[in-house]
Image (cartoon, rainbow, N blue to C red):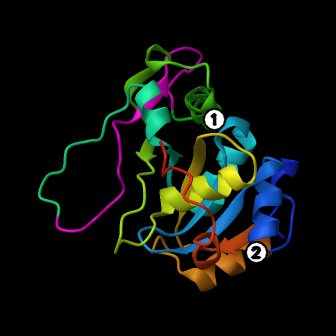
Amino acid sequence: MIECKDDRVQTEDHGLKAATRALAKGEIVILTDTPDAGPVMIMDAAKASPATINFMAKHGRGLIGLAISPGRAMQLGLVLQPLRNRQRIGPSYTYSIEARDGVSTGISAADRALTIRVAANPASQAYDLVSPGHIFPQIALPSMPGRARSCAELALSLQQAAGGGQAVAICSILTETGGDANHVHARLLAKETGLAWVAAEEAVALPDAVADN
């Protein structure tokens, strides 16, 4: 098993119950087979720590960001980046963010964990964040007929099924050679690291967490 000093990543199981149980404890969970992002690591943004963010960076290897509800984005004053020369549907990214206070360069695991927690804190307002920064939020938009639910929507649905708030830390998963990971790689990674995992097709059964936002 890959070592991690943070006990929030020490669980082995799979399925909806295992994933929501792990999320409720503040552990990292692997969500596989999402239609727009492939496999990702997710966790309750309010419980992000330097150790868990470093774990995501080391073992997930991809971009670390946030999935937030439309209501939370509005509260934080985050708006979508404009589309340009876009031929496919992609993540609903806002401008990148940084915590206004308490960070140095912004890129360290501690700085990114702080920015994520500030964004997740219900008491935070637009003033508490600056742009650009090293964290990349995406808005989990409500599902639409004929469109598969996005990674951000599914992550937020899992989070709220676990009793969490309106922000989920997300890290894309890459292979050791830097390529896109698939479900086989993701499940092997879950086994090696002891993380709980759940397939997107199971998470689809959960209520849409942002339908009324």
Amino acid type of the residue tagged 1 in the rendering: Ala
Mark 1 is surrounded, within 10 Å at the Cα level, by few (under 14), some (14 to 19) or many (20 or more) other residues, namely many
Measured along the vertical axis of the image, is residue 134 above or below residue 196? Answer: above
- Residue shown at 68% from the left, 36% from the top: 46
Element under disc 2: loop
Residue 96 lies in the magenta-colored region: yes
Residue 17 shows in the view: yes
- Residue shown at 57% from the left, 71% from the top: 204
Q: Quadrant of residue 185?
A: bottom right
* Left-right relation of 195 to 165: right
Label 1 or label 2, whichever comes before in sequence order: 2
| Viewer-side label of 1, 2 | 2
Q: Position of residue 154 (x, y in %)?
A: 55, 62
Question: Which residue is at the far bottom?
Answer: 184
* Left-right relation of 190 to 105: right
Mark 2 is surrounded, within 10 Å at the Cα level, by few (under 14), some (14 to 19) or many (20 or more) other residues, namely some
From the image, tell me which residue sits under label 2: 15
Measured along the vertical axis of the image, is residue 14 above or below residue 119? Answer: below
Q: Position of residue 93 (x, y in %)?
A: 35, 47
The span shown in magenta is: 87-106
